[in-house]
Image (tube, rainbow, N blue to C red):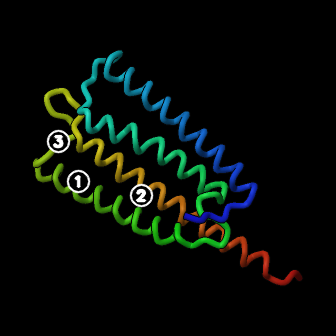
Amino acid sequence: MEHNFDEKQIYDRGKAFQLGFIAALVTTVCLFIITDGLEIKIDSYAAFLFALWIPVTVCSIALIAKDAYDGVNSTKGRLVLGIYGIAGVMIIILTTAKLCTGAERIAENGCITSSAGHLVSGLCMVATAAVYWAKQYANAKEYTDDEKPMG
């Protein structure tokens, strides 16, 4: 797999991955405090989804903010993040439908269920896609504003 990242993007990617790692540590500590300190039960699959999606989202948003998500002259991110955002919306809609019909609950018998994990997953996916498309719009606007003649 070939990626064409310039030196600044490589540096910024390293910083984004550091943020993702720190987010993973903080998420793990928070899950420990919630489950063992506060004795709130969390379904193991929900805890897994929290521990997975929160750091991935932090890292992805940091990459996008620094224009280090896509390589130089790459447009693959547009397709990937479009599908990613649609998948997130579908997860939210399906989970919400199950919650509204009573087929699933956010918490049951004092335990946070996997439905909460699904909602967090969907929200993280939608947030990442929204930030990507907002950044694409801002970059395009900046590019077109730079081309306008002065005066």
Q: Nearer the viewer, mark 1 or mark 2?
A: 2
What residue sits right under mark 1 in the picture?
Answer: 96
Residue matched to label 3: 105
Is 73 or 67 nearer to us in this picture?
Answer: 73
Please give the name of the residue rendered at 53% of the width and 70% of the height, measured from the top-left corner: 76
Task: Tell me which residue sits at (18%, 56%) in the image.
Answer: 97
Q: CA distance from mark 2 to mark 3?
A: 22 Å
- The quadrant the N terminus occupies is bottom right
Q: Amino acid at mark 3?
A: Arg
Q: Amino acid at mark 1?
A: Thr
* Relative to 71, 8 lies left or right: right
What amino acid is at disc 2? Val
Q: Secondary structure at mark 1?
A: helix
The secondary element bearing badge 3 is classed as loop
Q: Quadrant of residue 17?
A: top right
Q: Which residue is mark 2?
A: 126
Q: Residues within 10 Å of mark 1 (few under 14, many from 20)?
A: some
| Location of residue 108 with respect to 34 vertically, above or below | below
Residue placed furthest toward the front: 1
Kind of element beneath mark 2: helix
Task: Give the mark nearer the N terminus: 1 vs 2.
Answer: 1
Which residue is found at the position 28% from the left and 57% from the top?
91
Q: Is residue 73 left or right of residue 56?
A: right
Q: Position of residue 70 (x, y in %)?
A: 60, 63
Quadrant that contains the C terminus: bottom right
Q: Quadrant of residue 140?
A: bottom right
Q: Is residue 28 above or below residue 1?
A: above
Q: Is residue 104 above or below residue 75?
A: above
